[in-house]
Amino acid sequence: MINLIIYRFSLLNKAKAQQVLNFYNEEDDLLDTMNDFCSHIHKNIRGYSDSLGKSRTFTLTDVQKKDMDKRIITGYFDSAYTGENGKIKDGKTNVLKFDISKNDLFSKDFFFLIHVPKNSKFGFLIVQKKENHGVKMVFENAFNNFMRLKGVSNYFLQLRQAPPRYFIKNFLEFGKLKEFRLIESSLKSSVDLINIDLGREERIFKLNSSLNDVQYLKDVLVKLFNSFSPTDEKIPFLNKGEFDEIAFVLGYGDASKTFYIKNQEKIRSNIDVTNLVEFEDGEATTDSLIKISLELINFAA
């Protein structure tokens, strides 16, 4: 299965104002800066530790390619981590070829495409999804550290999920409501006159598709999703009160997607493109990955 994750990025100054990407700093083109960054991480492997204490590395498999006409940079990230024992065996004979220890780096390569359009404050990063190999945080941190190394400390990159509009539309229009959650960010209680923060409260409602009210509930949630204003602090829901967040899960085809009424940027943007790319020796071809990535960007822009 080939899944692609779509991120939209912006470059902010210290006042958090978005910059025109091909003319930030009043002269520099972010496409060139991104290309320099890719060359840097190819030559300088980034090492770090994740939240589980595993050692990780982040680099490029090979030198990236830049296409000025399409304003894209393409290549393959190389992500690796330690902490797992394993064995490499011959696929035909099952004979042991190599033991993997917890100190060995387990590495995977995965496709990426960076698009920096002209006269825009938004660009796109598309990354092939690989299990246990996240990109968002390490890419952001690595790029912002690179900018500081260049002596440019007044700009920073920010990545956000960017699911294509048609993808969202299909789920909202044709998806079946599976569950919804009513969320209070902070629940306070008074014990012996001392306020104690009991943390977040979630009320989860799992639904049977045969119930008569499921479509009605879905219509209410979708209407809230489409009409929510960022200035609204609370979300009213029927006669149940007002909430800090409401999340709901829709099933469409073989996939399920969680939607957030307030924090819509949390909606995951991974798209299964297995049936849309070409394969050679069991691997998706780079040309077909580039082609479908550019099509997805047109839908997400």
Image (cartoon, rainbow, N blue to C red):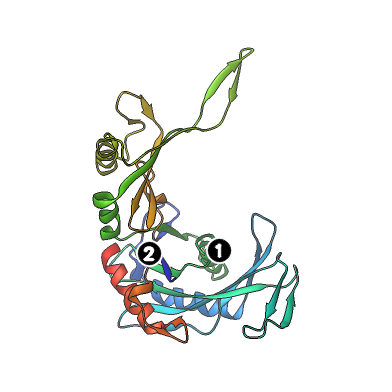
Quadrant position of the N terminus in the picture: bottom left
Q: Is residue 232 visible?
A: yes
- In the image, is 219 to the left or to the right of 4? left
Between 250 and 108, the one lying in front of the other is 250
- Percent position of residue 10, x then y: 39, 61
Q: Tag 1 or tag 2, which sits nearer the N-term?
A: 1
Position of residue 65 relative to residue 201, above or below, is below
Position of residue 155 relative to residue 87, above or below, is above
Q: Residue at x 70, y 57 (%)?
A: 53
Position of residue 268 relative to residue 65, above or below, is above
- In the image, is 167 to the left or to the right of 185? left
Helix, strand or loop at disc 1?
Answer: helix
Tag 1 residue: 138
Tally of marks: 2
Tag 2 residue: 271
- Percent position of residue 5, x then y: 42, 64
- In the image, is 40 to the left or to the right of 281? right
> Which numbered marker is on residue 22?
none
